[in-house]
Amino acid sequence: MTISRRDIIKLSVTTGAALSIPSVLRAQSTTPAARTVRMVKGNVRIFDPILTTSADTYDHALAIYDTLFGVDANFVPRPQMVGKWGVSDDQKTYTFELRDGLRFHDGSPVTAADCVASIRRWGNADSGGKVIMARARDISKKDDKTFSIVLEEPLGLLIDILAAPGGLFPAIMREKDADRPATEQVTANIGSGPLKFNEALAKPGASFTYDRNEQYVPRKERPDGFAGGKIVNIDRVIWDNIADQQTALAALQAGEIDFLRDPPFDLLPIIENDPNLALQVLNRAGDTIFLRMNCLQKPFNNVKARQAMLHLIDQEAILQAAAGSANYTRTVHSLFGVGTPYTNDENTGWFKKGGDPEKARQLFKEAGYAGEKVVMLDSTEYAVAHNANQIVAAELRKIGVNAELATTTWSELVTRRAKKEPVENGGWSIFVSSWSGANLGDPLGTPFFAANGDKAWYGWPKDDEYEAVRAKWVDTETLDERKALAREMQRRWWDFVGAIMLGNVVPPIAHRKTLTGLIGVPKAVVPMWNMRKG
Amino acid sequence: MALYVLRRLVSTIAVMAMVGIFIFLLLRLAPGDPAAIIAGDTATPEMIANIREKLGLNEPLPVQFAHWAHSILSGNLGISIFTGRPVLELISQRLEPTISLAILTMILSVTIGVTFGILAAWRAGGLVDRTLTALATLGFSVPVFVVGFFLIYFFAIRTRWLPVQGYQPIDHGFGPWLVQLILPTMTLALVYVALIARMTRASMLEVLSEDYMRTAAAKGVSSYSMLFHHALKNAGVPILTVIGLSFAYLISGVVITETVFNIPGVGRLVVDAINNRDYPVIQGVLILASGMYVLINLAVDLAYTLIDPRIRY
């Protein structure tokens, strides 16, 4: 068997032709969709925003549902679906009138009955909503466009709670959907928001498609946070779920997607050096990483051990390891995070610098620490928290604390953190997570703020004096009153140490430069309105 | 033969039932709580408890199993805890990309792998053999994601010849469908080319050393006829076995390749479901995958009779 020169030429021509087929086919098949925006922002697992606190579900709901009120970028509540509203002289009766032209995506008009049913469903699940429900004597419609909330006692925060940036998304649904129990998922995906969910193109786990709601009547005000005119300038948004970040970045570079939320910090230089891409910080309040300790078990059932952690933690070192880039991180010392209306420096001077292992060692000793195992739940899926865990564990070991990292998945972590037992029986000592600015600016809707022992959020801190101060929050009427109360809460919080802040990360989003008009909100979500492409 | 096929089909049902029971128990005993995942990272214990109650996760295991078994026996694989959609619908959405990738990969792998294997056996010990064996070892050794990202970098980012990621259904046109699958197919085929080439080489070498091959050569039979009419046919059974097992494995989903190229296939579905503890989806996919695995094995066993008349059932 011999191979001639002619055979080689034939083979070369055939191979060349075969290799050129893909690019020819690609040229024929890929039509640039100038009015379609492709975004990679996570994965919507649950559609119903009343069933879950997931940020991705919040993001999905933000597109297809509308709310009665929404907060602007400064956390000030503004009317959204509501056209006019008023409160009686005794401050007990609130009356709301809907704007003209509001329609659900199935064509039916939004009525007061829909709003009443939606408030009730949300109010049964949301922390802030429960306050309204507890005080409400009556929530009922007056006519098709008007409804009222009649209270037993005045509630100065009522409008703030209805705008609820930190709690569950207060979506206005159709009455027949909202009549379902709050624990039963609504999967109809029919709202009255600026975008419509395209059910036919939905591929759970892969991609979801949102079409412009042509019947939507936006407000006249300019867009501002969750408030203002929600004007959709494109025809379609495709929300892709690309599980691998490296692939997502390659797709962004190749122009297959327009937007990537949360690019990993180690890939930022690639984006910065690409002339077609840009980084932008949309969520200026960022995410505050915190460390929660199990206050029911040793050693953190002793306040001195918790105070020791405050002295031990060097936020700058942790942020350097956790996120790497100083451009997108900052230290945080306030219980209320960074850049929220209630951020303050009360009672922070004594631990502010941190990074004092000797003081921490001494306080652990005073707490009677005798070498008990400190189990740190460490989810490898959450990179920033995982990196922070490594540093904290190393620092603890340096001062003689028997710290053990329990590597796990996030789903296992959320199950295990509910256990109140000692570590020997499957319990835990420390876990790391984060809250958005919207959460830390909403002490009523965010369970993190509670310190009522067994009834508190995981970690179960208990301090009666703090709780007495916190209880006053619902009855504050002005921003200044709330700011003063926030200082008082924080003063006490840092004495009993309900949690430790590890730093604030302001993650940038990446987008192609052809995509403009992105709106910033104080939460890890990105509104799909106002964007332009081209 | 008919009796044999019937017996194997009955055993398929038994295998699927065993897999079902095993998976059901394994998932319930593994840590993780779908209610906690549904409720979200910042949920209160009360929210999680309410969802657990609603989903029936507080019921005793035998009761949960009875509900599920009843649903399966009614021909219903259940409803996804998360999306609220029928499991069968979710699986059927994901089957086309996986089957497409599997078929293209097998076509490419068998064509190249068998050819390489025959060439290597024919020139055993020579330069061709050593080169092809080295390439096969490389194909085995380099992780799939490394190959995938290398191909993405060269063909998608540098030259822009091919797309980075995604999938186009075949009803959107043969061209777009094929274009989307070229890189993942090349990535995946590398492993299977190596596997099939090595198996073909080994089997061919064994047959080529038989007396009857020497007799054929002495009688002046051409190299082509010796290799393809005599040796390949006799070496076919183990090659067919490897091809069948490889295809079955591909159909069950290839997670890494699907992840690297963002192909919404069965592999990604089951991994997402495991991360979410979406019990009905995991159970549904694994039961169907086990059924398909057994059926493909049956098809391979039956195919033996086509290439080796000595095999009878």
Image: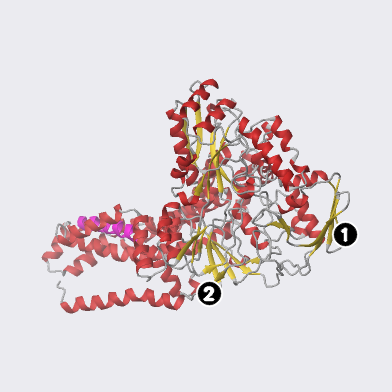
Residue at figure coordinates x 65%, y 61% from the top left? A224
Which of B3 and A231 lies nearest the eye of the viewer?
A231
| Quadrant hosting residue A147 | bottom right
Q: Are marks 1 and 2 on the same chain?
A: yes
Identify the mark at residue A34; answer none if there is no mark.
Answer: 2
Q: Position of residue A517 (x, y in %)?
A: 57, 66
Residue at figure coordinates x 42%, y 60% from the top left? A272
Q: Number of labelled discs?
A: 2
Instruction: Chain letter for mark 2, please.
Output: A
Q: Residue furthest left?
A: B218
Residue A151 relative to residue A429: left or right: right
Give the main secondary structure, helix, strand or loop, of the magenta stretch. helix
Specify few, some or many for label 1: CA neighbours under 10 Å numbering under 14, 14-19, or 20 or more: some
To which residue does mark 1 refer? A142
Residue at figure coordinates x 27%, y 55% from the top left? B138
Amino acid of disc 2: Ala
Residue at figure coordinates x 69%, y 36% from the top left? A488
Q: Magenta includes A427? A: no
Instruction: Chain letter for mark 1, please.
Output: A
The correct choice, above or below, for B235 with respect to A469 in the image is: below
Q: How is the image coloured?
A: secondary structure
Q: Position of residue A300 (x, y in %)?
A: 57, 28
Identify the secondary structure beneath mark 2: loop
Q: Is residue A200 visible?
A: yes
Q: Which residues are magenta?
A: B189-206
